[in-house]
Amino acid sequence: MAITNGNGRARTLPKRAPGLATLEEVARVAGVSRATVSRVVNDSPRVSPDVRQAVERAIESLGYVPNRAARSLVTRRSDSVAVVITEPTGRLFSDPFFPRLLRGISAELAGRDRQLVLVMPESAADERRAAAYLSAGHVDGVLLTSLHGDDALPRELLARGVPVVVGGRPIHGEQVSYVDVDNRAGGREAVAHLAARGRRTIATIAGPHDMAVGIDRLAGYRDGLTAAGLAADPGLVAEADFTHDGGARAMRSLLDARPDLDAVFAASDAMAAGALSELLAAGRRVPEDVAVVGYDDSPIAAATRPPLTSVRQPIEEMGREMARLLVESIGRGERAIRRVVLATELVTRASTEVKARH
Amino acid sequence: MAITNGNGRARTLPKRAPGLATLEEVARVAGVSRATVSRVVNDSPRVSPDVRQAVERAIESLGYVPNRAARSLVTRRSDSVAVVITEPTGRLFSDPFFPRLLRGISAELAGRDRQLVLVMPESAADERRAAAYLSAGHVDGVLLTSLHGDDALPRELLARGVPVVVGGRPIHGEQVSYVDVDNRAGGREAVAHLAARGRRTIATIAGPHDMAVGIDRLAGYRDGLTAAGLAADPGLVAEADFTHDGGARAMRSLLDARPDLDAVFAASDAMAAGALSELLAAGRRVPEDVAVVGYDDSPIAAATRPPLTSVRQPIEEMGREMARLLVESIGRGERAIRRVVLATELVTRASTEVKARH
DNA sequence: CCGAAACGTGAGAGCGCTCTCACAATCAGC
DNA sequence: GCTGATTGTGAGAGCGCTCTCACGTTTCGG
């Protein structure tokens, strides 16, 4: 008879799955104590070689796997790390940033035998719940991505003593470890590339001013202008929201303000694609009349006509680095702040290269 | 002095984080027994209203959060669910399928108070490790996506008694619960749309023959031809690998075989975009000479010129449904096989609509 | 108004593990 | 050969929780 409690779960204790031995059983088979088996399992050096071998054989024959819950209970470690992705919209779906980042994180954590717990709050209520969950010590550390400027989560977690590593420079200079790509250098390089090809009136479609990527890529654009000896003009700067349509709108306003522009650097490929559509609709040839550079080197960049020159970021690497920093910080138990900035790379395609005439 | 064991972790037991009360403390504050607090926490009906209220007040004042490890240890439940994403390449990065799916899964699990453990094996060794991990009872159930035909994982897990729900119809008709979108109906609808606009020589760029999505969308294409009274011609069918370049190559061979074709249905937006580039390069006008339909309704579809008519899939919904099926199956403890197929929707854009002349 | 059933609560065991401590055996130094 | 350190091992406590069982109290039919 199935009696259920308030949760609708069966009340009777399920039996341990067959084949799942306990430390106790391994100890009996190996003819040693539980403590010794535990030492073997945890790689303690204080075990004699022959005993170790006997235990390993017993483990093998019983297919023993440690019970994480029991271990967690006593060590007060969960050996799991949360990845929090709070993305209202846009970037989450418009390019493969998150899958790549997750892949990098996952690869690094798997190698260190840590679970990856994914948290994707959608509403403010979700975020509250997530914060409570993360603060409750259910995970050993937290990886945060795409903070919006006023995000209190990292502060809260740090205050609770939960190790945190952020992906992307936090905008308000919070005292927290982070890994970022060198967005500023990427922007600078993009503009240098355009200037080297003779472009003199280089516009930019910047990302939102309240996101570090938006700010940094714009700063890089300005650096690039300065380096090339070109004048900055507010009429050459438009802001959009990283989306295709936003990019198209921004392009329209740039064309209104400066019909003479001969290049555009967009802070995302989606925006660059939108700008490209708009340029072609306005009768400009790309790259002959206007060269276009995107950012992210996403699949969109290869799919447009002409394909887009774009700034590639080492996203998997960023994920790996985040995981590495976090696990090290957990292991050491210290809370030193570390910052890692990874280099970008410009990928050249037809949107900036005028074919030689012959 | 920091003494560390073989793991390089601090040996001394960390103190429980301040503010993290135990059941015991709550019981003391509320003036009841541990068992009663447990009942309140677990929504047992057998608690009198006044006692319940007292306990809830104590929980509130102490900021009590149950320790999952301790609970898991006794219930033999982890209240966590693994999501396994095994994607050699391509789909993981070419469209936002996985982020959306994860979002759907995450939303559903959060509402049911379950953790989402993400597993992304990259190598065969990773997969072995993942299989061992998942079989060891560390999670209550497993959500699998994008199986390659010969994947033994679902069988293994089922044999171990681990509940499994698969995303996407398994190709070999495995006896396993799954959620899929109606790829066949989507293909049929795409072709019907083209036929209704007077297209008579409709080609298709199919996905790989060893993936259910490839097979089903092609079957839908054939259904559509039959329904429209059009003849099937092997020269109108090309196979590609879901990528942009693959789509372009397939388009080239289709144009060679049937230069008279007036429409193409591609089984992914990336392939449709590749086909589009190729068509334009070959001097065909889209949609005037050749109409193009993609699949997935990904950002690529909106970014091409002209934008692509495409088949939209309810991906978040699919994730939610997968999570729902899994959690229900865990809760009931039964292993009945369930199948859910979700409807698609055709999103019409300029690649199939010739503007009326005036 | 009595006995039985239903209800609300507490005591206590024990989930599987790690870690401290105690102790026996071995080793080194003189 | 004795003392003292070092090493390998086991006994045992206890992490925080859930669940069974026992028991006192209320409810209710006859």
Image (tube, coloured by chain):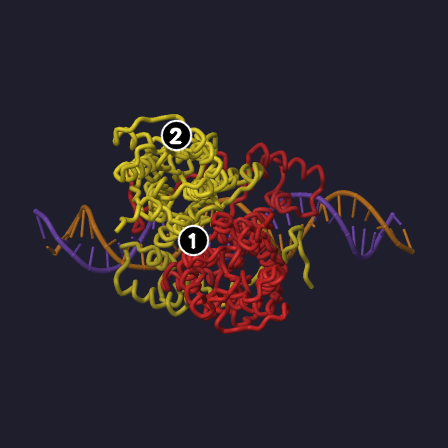
Chain colours: A red, B yellow, C orange, D purple
Q: Note whether B18 is above or below B168 in the view shown.
A: below
Instruction: Kindly indicate whether the residues beneath marks 2 and 1 are on one polypeptide chain.
Output: no
Label 1 neighbour load within 10 Å: few <14, some 14-19, many 20+: some
Q: Is residue B78 visible?
A: no
* Residue A250 location, quadrant: bottom left
Label 2 neighbour load within 10 Å: few <14, some 14-19, many 20+: many
Residue that extends furthest to the front in the rendered view of this protein = A358
The residue closer to the viewer here, A254 or A337, is A254
**Residue A93, label in figure:** 1
**Amino acid type at image mark 1:** Phe
- What is the x, y in percent for residue B46? 27, 55
**Residue A342, label in figure:** none
The residue closer to the viewer here, A42 or A304, is A304
The residue closer to the viewer here, A332 or A250, is A250
**Amino acid type at image mark 2:** Leu
Disc 2 to disc 1, how far (Cα)? 33 Å
Residue hosting label 2: B236
- What is the x, y in percent for residue B24? 43, 61
Q: Is residue A254 visible?
A: yes
